[in-house]
Image (tube, coloured by chain):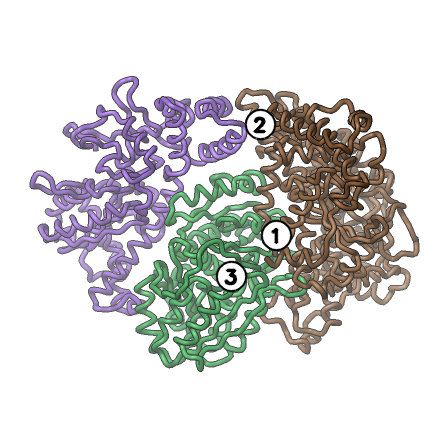
Amino acid sequence: MDNPFKKRATEYIADPQGLLSLLSAEPLKLFLDEDEQFDRVVIVVGTPGSGKTTIAKLFEFDTLVTLCSLVGIAGPNLRQLAAVLHEKKVLVDNIPRFLAYRLPAGSSLRDIWELPYQETIKHALLRSFIQARAALGWMRRMERAEVRIAEVTIVPREDAESQAQVLHLNDPIKFREHARVVEEQIFRVITALVPPREEELAELPVPIRYNLFDSIRAFRVPRIPGVSETEVELQPMIIIDDAHELHPAQFGDTDLWLRNREIKLARWMLTRVDAIGHSDFRKALSEAEQEMKPGTTPQRDRVIKLMQKDRTRVAFRSIARDVSRKYLTQMPIFARRGLDNLDRCLREDAPTINQTNLKALREEVRRMERSPKLGAKKLQSIRAAVPEHLKPDVAEAVYRILLSRELKKTPQDDLFGADEDLEPEEESLRTKPSVVIGAEIQLLHQFERPFYFGFDRVADCSTSNIEQFIGLAGSLVEQIEAKIIKNKDSSLDAKEQHKAVMDRALDTMRRWDFPHSDAARKLVAFIGQRCIEKSLEPNAPLGEGANSFGIPQAEMERFQETAPALAPVLHYALAYNALSLKENYLCKGKVWCLFELGGIPSIAHRLPQAKGNFCEGKLADLLGAISE
Amino acid sequence: MKKQLALHLLSQLLEWDTNESTAEFDWLRMMVEAKFDHYQGYTPGERFYVHFIHWLRQFSTLEERRVAYEFVKSRLIFISQREMHHLVSLTYPVIQRATRRCIADELGLKVHETWLHPQAESQIAESSIRTLYVGLSDGARIDVFRRENEGVISNEQVVASSEITLKKWVDLKDELRKLLDTRGYASSEATFKRICLIDDFTASGSTMVRYKDNEWKGKLHRFCNASLPYVEEFIAKRALIHVHHYLGTEKAKAKIDELVSAYANQVGDFQFLMTFSHVLSGDVVVDDAADEKLVSLIKKHYDKSIENSHLGVDVWYGYGQCGLPVVLDHNSPNNSIALIWARGEHADAMRPLFPRKQRHVQHGQSV
Amino acid sequence: MSKFSRDFCIAHECKEASDFFEDVLCAAERVLFIGTVGLEVSSLYFPMLLQGSTGVDYRFIVEMRRSVDPRLLELGQRHRAFLEANLGAHRTQFVEVAVVAAEDGATVAGRNAVNAASQWLSGTYSDVVIDATGMSRGTCFPVIKQAMEIAARQGANLHVVVAGEKKRTLKIRSETNDRADWIHGFQGPMGSDKANDIMTLWVPQLSEHMSGALSRMYPELQHPSEVCPILPFPAHDLRRGDNLRSEYRDALQNEWEAGSLDLIYAHETNPLDVFRTISKLHDTRKRVFGGTEQLATTVLSPSGWRVGSIGMLLAAIEHDLPMLYVETVGYSCEGEIPETIEPKVPEVSWHLWLAGAPYANATSSL
């Protein structure tokens, strides 16, 4: 492998050791930042590349066993992973607490919905299939961890004696064989070119009802080689990955089923943002986003965890550093030079626009200064408000913004009308950092001054999505590698970084290939254009600038009925990080729904990564954008 | 030469910025590993990068070097060994289908009527046994052909050289007899009804057959001439000489068709048929109508010292002015643009990228 | 079943194929022709060849997708009108088949196509002809499989035809679904627990602008032991293979770890060569794994070049191989759309006789 950045995600790593070598403790810490609940259904929501599958794979039994067996001899990274897992009681005394199996939903589960049967039968088939697969999956995971299946004890739930017999819980070999036969039978029904008629189902050689989750409590294994020589009791755990591939009705039924508190298994469903066909789910999601306290209402029968949260931006930077360090050390051309730190290769010395442009900027500012509304004293105080450490071009641009604001607010001259968008702090003598960024954005658009450079900014552009970060970092690493070959120095200046990142963003958008990607591009282009216009307003009303489009929340409540053409476009745009949705956003006494541009489109439109900065509009505007 | 050094030198020669370097290094690494370094005309220590740098250095301006690089990147066709082997594998099915068509014609049937038609199927099967496959050159890779058709064509039906001695004919006939007997054709004559002459590549057709100085020349004529004494005893009367090339051009196809018809009229002893595994589209040809910078480069960096009586004069577009941008893994055809393969005589003369191995010289002509 | 095999498969190309249509199918007792309303004019070729016969029932699948460029929709409608006008409304039926489920975009093309076709195939026919020219693989291949089973029961002959040009005439861009699917009827044990025990070799056909689709397929396979991509060679443009290698170099090197030696070549427009190539590969694997307890299979992914992918279908049927693909859910058009319909003889056309009379006591070879 020449360039590990080009390999898409750790999801492709088959063996536990390989997976562990590429995992870092940081994202795990972030993910397990609440008190975990392993006694109720947990729905993990994240976009592709957010790392949810990776974490699921970590939880699988054989991966945890490998971790435990290596931790004594492994490096700091594995020890840190183990420490986090101990803290969250996933490991206890270096022994896994769970027997977890990750079941990718896949087309077979979804296909059940297309069978020509009544809904109740289809739901029953799905539940049975999931349970049979879980049984087989747990056995496989134990086998991979070299546990001897014949010596395993399956502990039934107290109230499940009759089922225990039917399912052969007293004999692990028979248990497995029975599960296999049931699974194969259902599988044959699902994959038949022409499925059996409903009346024929009862006549199948094997009964297709399989009710395992209500019947078991635990698995007891006498020993786990390399980890424990004494008996261990394991709580079974099922992780249904890519649950968004289920039909909405299937998702709903599975959610309902797994919410049953009688089930003693730990159960997770990993899904993309768009499995939110149901408005109640969207509401729950929005509530989860706004929850600031961990581990709330214990009587909830469902927990929603979000992979990409606002407050994780700074934490993500450390994940990004970790990941890039890991990958760089695998590239000989970097390792030979002791370059294990991408930071060092991304120079942060900011460029200044050229003299001609600077002169033009200064002249513009001087023209503004000559306005009769601005007295000498006022000018002095505005000048003083410009932070000192800034380069001359940025300083001038900040000054220009402050002047515009001042000019706007003079009561006798109402050329621009009342401006409701100004930050309340605009009266403050100290200029907020957001205004500095706003100035940089304006310089980018006006004079092509590089903006996307420096490790932190690149990490922030990835909107907490590991795969996006790897893509952006990969482009930068490629350029650095080329430079090393050319015998130039091993770092990129701001201009080079900016270009690489921009090119990558534009290329990524060009290659978007998902359903309705054309319409998604139009939607993004529309929002991008409006945000650019807002960001380039001389008084920078939103500080850094805008990267969202806000509509009244009320319009969102029934958007599936009022704007049906938009629903599928949004469905996929959200799933693929083209946009993200922030509902019930309070701003200046109104409730908004924000359509935020994803990291890549923000870069492509040369906009900042700013949360909550939006331009106002209506649902009809968005509809208009996609119907052109 | 170490890859990194080579890429560094190339980026200097072509004055690539970081962006361009990134893209081009990627492409080069892939193509060099996949194809270019495997050119059989190279020796250890002197593989593609060395030749490429040396080749580019003959162009004095940056613009010329970039035109040359662009030519390699977007027009050069390098047929790798594995690709060539695939063309070999297509041969037998092409020959079999041609056989079916011929027999359909003979019996007054359409092709679709021959399936399971007892007489047709019998004749096709018999014809397959009474076929001799002859490699006309090393490039015919007759060993690969044999391997590809193991179990389908008997070893004794394949010969690696077109020079077949009497003793060899006798052996071939003996084996043919045995094969016919074991396969239920005891009453069939043990003579070859079809002789497939197999070669790798033809761009102009003239190596196969040409009429020059009032006489027929070329591999086909040489073979037919040499085989005449063996007709009736080893070769059936009016046997079909089936010429198959793995790769040809539209120009060659047309030329060979025309010439072979004329040849057949003059030489009544055989029938003739031409097939190809693949015919190159005329789009690939580089001629005066091509991009003017490329044309100018090709003509400017042409060295007359490469000319000889076989090649002719003004052969900047290669022998026969074929203008091909083709390189085969085992050798560059001389019908390709001279700039690709030709080496001038003096130190500063034109340099090859994929130097052509001259074959054996016959009467002062390289063949 | 009396069907083709790798040693004996009746195939006709170009004039041979049209001769067959004229001499045999036009005179056949009762023919069921299943085709589709395609976007390329080549999709009109085979239906029109049977125009003169009185014994043909035409059934056309109209594949319904959510996001299709209106100009392409209009072109499709023109083609439909052409077929109706020239073949006669009384013997043609057009049935709309949804390719994806409206609620959630899941692929349902195969099941829906099989549902529609099962009614047609219940009739009594001497010959069933399935025209793959305009049909997506997800629709076409399940219908062919179904037709094979039914034709075998009824003793009918089954033919598959496909036509195309060496260079694309319309500049159509496909939008692919965001999930990989097993072609209906070609799933085998894949996706079941048993699949974990099977060592898979993945053989994807490489084609332009399909990297998104291919990257969705790879994870579905859960770590294939090996990847052997097929490149089109020989092809009309001999550099096509190199260009594809360049386009997919990241995937080849870093994701699939497929080096030069893992690449396979198959003729761009000769389905028999594709069939042969895959059969050879399969034979080798059988030899290697045959004596062991290790289960092994080869997963095929047809994409892009339609004529070549028929070869994959033949291999899948012959060797019982699973096929994985990503359905196309939309089309956009980047170039001009022809104003008039100008039917012409396509540069590439094939007729393949898959099952029926000739195979009842087959002894002949190709």
Specify the quadrant that holds the N terminus of chain B: top left
Q: Which residue is mark 3?
A: C137
Q: Residue at (18%, 46%) from the top-left corner? A: B169
- One can see residue C263 in this view: yes
Secondary structure at badge 3 equals: helix
Disc number placed over residue A522 in the picture, else none: 1
Position of C34 relative to A154 (above/below)? below
Distance from Cα at disc 3 to Cα at disc 2: 42 Å
Please identify which colour was used for chain B in the image. purple
Of A507 and A198, the residue lying toward us: A507
Q: Colour of chain C?
A: green
Mark seen at residue A481: 2
Check if mark 3 and mark 2 are on a common chain.
no
- Subunit under mark 1: A
Say what amino acid the circle numbered 1 marks. Answer: Lys
**Chain A rendering hue:** brown
Spot occupied by residue A551 in the image (x, y as percentages of width and height): 75, 54
Dot in front, 3 or 2: 2
Label 2 SS: helix
Determine whether the residue tagged by mark 1 lies in a helix, strand or loop: helix
Amino acid under disc 2: Glu
Gap between marks 1 and 3, in whole Å?
29 Å
Q: In which image quadrant can residue B66 be found?
A: top left
Q: How many numbered marks, from 0 up?
A: 3
